[in-house]
Image: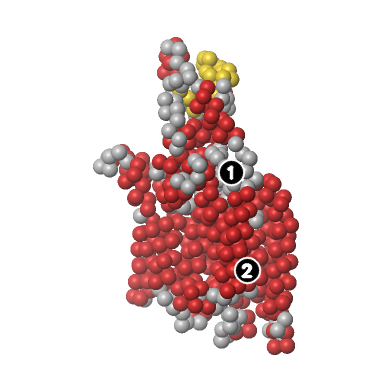
């Protein structure tokens, strides 16, 4: 990469890498090495069959091309349908899809950093750190939406930066289309929207950094900017239209108003909207967010990543502001989301923090080697820093692998086999949407929808007491998945095979 001329020439100014023209052999080898190495790591620890909770549901829904829980995840479901055909059973294929996207996302982070003229060793070390981080790895070995969601998020950044690199607005349309499709992979991509919007508003390859910020402020007052924004939004809408494809596969009657109202509730979040609480000042959230970042990057890595995003303003104000707005938007949107696994929703911000580590070190390196007599040392210093950053990630990789390894995780499959073999014909489960009930119900869902087994078993939600008494009086086999929450308070039960049979109602 040659330094760009101008006011920022001393810092190796914003000079995105043009992959089809300027990418060197080492860059292609780095991306391939990341994909190959991480594919091997994830493959060795991949869950070989169905897993609990959402993973079982995603595999079941993908096999049947049906929407998952809100907001439906149509892009994920369509990709999952393709991958479900690859293995010995649908769950293995959908698990493998997480590993596939997990191996792609760090490569995209590498490309993004090279677009920003970050030295290759630093870009590689930061990308490897993301791929080997505990949270990311844990979501790459089982059917989940987060590695795919991050892949689409990073691909959007790469495409928008390519628009600047190639002086070609068509890359804006590509990025906008990817962003729209990414909404159907995981909605967290929307939380990065301010960063994406800034890159679109500042698109002008011939302008200086200062003037490009002025273009964003100019906004809708210029007709050409209005057309640019409108066209980008149209491509986002085209990608997001994937949400309208799902009813074609799932609805029995496309003209049914009830079906469309139900689908509207699904894609707008359904009951999950109630998990957002109105606690505007929450030290507990700050602590949870901090712990999430430290678990992935360590204290020193987190502080360096934050400082690096700030130092990136010396390199290019638009780029730095776009990355910072994206990270802060991701954190702000989920600051009051009261779920047990909140850390996975911070993955986009965590990935950008890894990018901040590389950007910060590279900017400091550029400052230290501004003098001509020191410039020749820059590649070797970058290599040394890359090794220093990569070594802790590699050294903890065996410990992380042992913690996230699901290669022998067959408990969910064993539970499924027991349900199939031991429950009587026509058995009925009663559930109340407790988290520990969902764990088992999702596996039953997989057995019925993906494997076509035990479709005679029915599941009722929030059954009235009078109906339950009537069914028990008739001698029906009624069960609960697990005596927790409302089920524990309402029923007298006994363990029977893989479930708990209801003996009667408590007062």
Its colouring scheme is secondary structure
Residue sitting nearer the eye, 438 or 425: 425
Q: Position of residue 287 (x, y in %)?
A: 66, 51
The answer to whether 76 appears left or right of 307 in the picture is left
| Percent coordinates x, y for residue 375 in the rendering | 69, 84
Per the image, label 2 sits on a secondary structure element best described as helix
**Which of these two is toward me, 79 or 372?**
79
Under tag 1, what secondary structure? loop
Image position, residue 265 (x, y; %): 39, 43
Image coords of residue 185 (percent x, y): 46, 52
- Label 2 crowding class (10 Å Cα cut-off): few <14, some 14-19, many 20+? many
Nearer to us: label 1 or label 2: 1
Question: Eyeballing the image, is 124 above or below 486?
Answer: below
> Residue 451, located in which quarter of the rendered image?
top left
The answer to whether residue 295 is visible is: yes
Residue at 65 percent across and 56 percent down: it is 132
Q: Quick one: quadrant of the N terminus?
A: bottom right
Q: Residues within 10 Å of mark 1 (few under 14, many from 20)?
A: many
Residue placed furthest toward the left: 255
Q: Is residue 373 left or right of residue 240?
A: right
Residue 319, by quadrant, is bottom right
Q: Relative to 301, is 338 above or below?
A: above
288 is higher (above) or lower (below) than 177: above
Res. 433 visible in picture = no
- The tag on residue 123 is 2
In primary-sequence order, the first of circles 1 and 2 is 1
The residue carrying mark 1 is 47
């Amino acid at each position: 990469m040659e330094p760009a001329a101008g006011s920022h020439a001393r810092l190796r100014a914003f000079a995105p890498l043009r992959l089809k023209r300027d990418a060197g052999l080492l860059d292609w080898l780095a991306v391939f090495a990341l994909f190959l190495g991480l594919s091997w790591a994830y493959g060795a620890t991949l869950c070989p069959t169905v897993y609990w909770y959402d993973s079982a549901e995603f595999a079941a829904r993908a096999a049947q091309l049906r929407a998952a829980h809100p907001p439906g995840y149509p892009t994920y479901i369509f990709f999952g349908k393709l991958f479900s055909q690859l293995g010995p059973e649908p769950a293995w294929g959908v698990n493998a899809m997480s590993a596939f996207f997990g191996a792609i996302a760090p490569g995209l982070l590498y490309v993004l950093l090279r677009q920003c003229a970050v030295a290759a060793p630093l870009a590689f070390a930061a990308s490897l750190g993301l791929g080997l981080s505990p949270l990311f790895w844990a979501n790459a070995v089982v059917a989940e939406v987060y590695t795919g969601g991050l892949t689409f998020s990073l691909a959007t950044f790469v495409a928008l930066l390519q628009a600047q690199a190639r002086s070609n607005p068509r890359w804006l349309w590509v990025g906008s289309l990817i962003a729209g499709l990414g909404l159907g992979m995981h909605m967290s991509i929307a939380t990065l929207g301010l960063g994406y919007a800034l890159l679109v508003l500042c698109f002008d390859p011939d302008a200086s950094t200062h003037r490009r910020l002025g273009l964003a402020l100019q906004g809708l007052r210029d007709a050409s900017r209005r057309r640019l924004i409108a066209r980008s939004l149209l491509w986002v809408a085209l990608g997001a239209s994937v949400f309208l494809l799902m009813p074609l596969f799932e609805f029995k009657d496309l003209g049914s108003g009830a079906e469309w109202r139900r689908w509207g509730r699904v894609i707008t979040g359904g009951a999950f909207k109630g998990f957002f609480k109105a606690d505007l000042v929450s030290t507990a959230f700050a602590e949870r967010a901090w712990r999430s970042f430290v678990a992935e990057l360590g204290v020193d890595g987190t502080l360096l990543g934050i400082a690096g995003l700030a130092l990136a303003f010396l390199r290019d104000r638009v780029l730095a502001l776009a990355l910072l707005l994206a990270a802060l938007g991701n954190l702000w949107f989920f600051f009051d989301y009261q779920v047990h696994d909140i850390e996975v929703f911070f993955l986009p911000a965590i990935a950008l923090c890894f990018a901040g580590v590389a950007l910060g070190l590279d900017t400091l390196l550029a400052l230290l080697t501004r003098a001509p007599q020191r410039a020749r040392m820059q590649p070797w210093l970058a290599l040394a820093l890359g090794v220093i950053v990569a070594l802790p990630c590699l050294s903890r990789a065996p410990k992380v692998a042992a913690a996230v390894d699901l290669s022998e995780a067959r408990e969910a499959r064993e539970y499924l086999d027991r349900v199939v073999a031991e429950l009587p014909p026509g058995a009925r489960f009663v559930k109340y949407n407790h988290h520990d009930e969902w764990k088992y119900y999702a596996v039953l869902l997989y057995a019925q929808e993906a494997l076509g087994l035990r479709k005679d078993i029915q599941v009722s939600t929030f059954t009235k007491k009078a109906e339950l008494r009537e069914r028990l009086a008739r001698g029906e086999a009624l069960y609960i998945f697990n005596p927790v929450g409302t089920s524990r308070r309402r029923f007298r039960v006994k363990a029977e095979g893989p479930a708990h049979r209801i003996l009667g109602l408590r007062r």
